[in-house]
Image: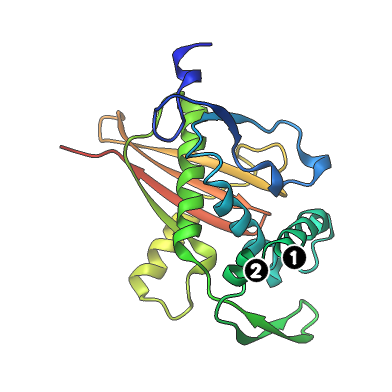
């Protein structure tokens, strides 16, 4: 193997295993063609799997996916994981509050919402961004990653924040994106050029999970 295949996609230390980017568990078994892996160390594979499971459960329990029969297998595996792990259940179901779900036919259902562990969500997407960058550029990303999870923006957010989100959402293009199973996952990179059309070293990664949850990652190098 070449040297790049022997180092962890996240930290550049010696790789001891391979990790699916995004995690294989997000895909039903009959939609796992063309998945790819990146080399990883133990810390950035095994330890990260807890965040993978948490985010899969949180997204899978969203009201937006209630009618998605194609994801029944993924959602069922998440519920089995919760049933087996009381600590995970406590984390996923933290601070319950009453909620109302409005279905497409305007029927309302009483439900419960829970507090989202933002640190785990941001950790998951930060690792995903670094893995996708490694896959495309064959090098470890050594800059910062600023994460904008559009599905978490509140309607009463500051106008400036709403405008930034709208600008980033304008970069999503499902038809012109990477991903063989776009109903599960797709993404695009936009490389930022300077006035002379030279790459600045920065890029914007747009990803969408389950054809519903859009997240933008602004990746900028550390400048001296």
Q: Residue at x 70, y 46 (%)?
A: 25
- Per the image, the residue denoted by label 2 is 89
Q: Position of residue 117 (x, y in %)?
A: 50, 66
Residue 60, compared with residue 143, is above or below; it is below
Q: Residue at x 51, y 55 (%)?
A: 215
Q: Residue at x 48, y 70 (%)?
A: 153
Image quadrant in which the C terminus is located: top left
What is the C-alpha distance between the residues marked 1 and 2? Answer: 7 Å
Q: Position of residue 44 (x, y in %)?
A: 48, 39
Tell me which corner region of the image, top left, top right, bottom left or bottom right, holds residue 62: bottom right
Residue 197, compared with residue 211, is above or below; it is above
Label 1 environment density (alpha carbons within 10 Å; few <14, some 14–19, many ≥20): few
Residue 165, compared with residue 141, is above or below; it is below
Q: Which mark is residue 83?
A: 1
Q: Are marks 1 and 2 in contact (CB under 8 Å)?
A: yes
Q: Position of residue 120 (x, y in %)?
A: 49, 58
């Amino acid at each position: 193997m070449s040297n790049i295949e022997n180092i962890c996609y996240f930290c550049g230390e010696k790789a001891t295993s391979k990790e699916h980017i995004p995690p294989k568990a997000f895909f039903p078994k009959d939609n796992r063609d063309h998945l790819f892996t990146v080399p990883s160390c133990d810390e950035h594979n095994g330890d990260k799997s807890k965040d993978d499971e948490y985010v899969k459960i949180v997204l899978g329990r969203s009201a937006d996916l209630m009618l998605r029969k194609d994801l029944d297998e993924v959602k069922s595996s998440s519920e089995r994981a919760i049933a087996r792990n009381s600590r995970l259940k406590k984390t996923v179901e933290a601070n319950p509050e009453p909620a109302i779900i409005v279905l497409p036919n305007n029927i309302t259902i009483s439900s419960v919402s829970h507090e989202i562990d933002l640190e785990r969500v941001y950790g998951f997407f930060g690792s995903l961004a670094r893995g996708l960058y490694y896959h495309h550029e064959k090098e470890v990303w050594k800059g910062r990653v600023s994460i904008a999870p559009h599905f978490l923006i509140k309607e009463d957010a500051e106008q400036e924040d709403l405008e930034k989100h709208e600008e980033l959402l304008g970069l999503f293009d499902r038809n012109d994106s990477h991903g063989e199973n776009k109903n599960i996952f797709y993404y695009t990179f936009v490389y930022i050029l300077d006035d002379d059309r030279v790459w600045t070293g920065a890029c914007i990664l747009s990803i969408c999970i389950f054809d519903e949850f859009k997240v933008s990652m602004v990746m900028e190098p550390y400048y001296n």
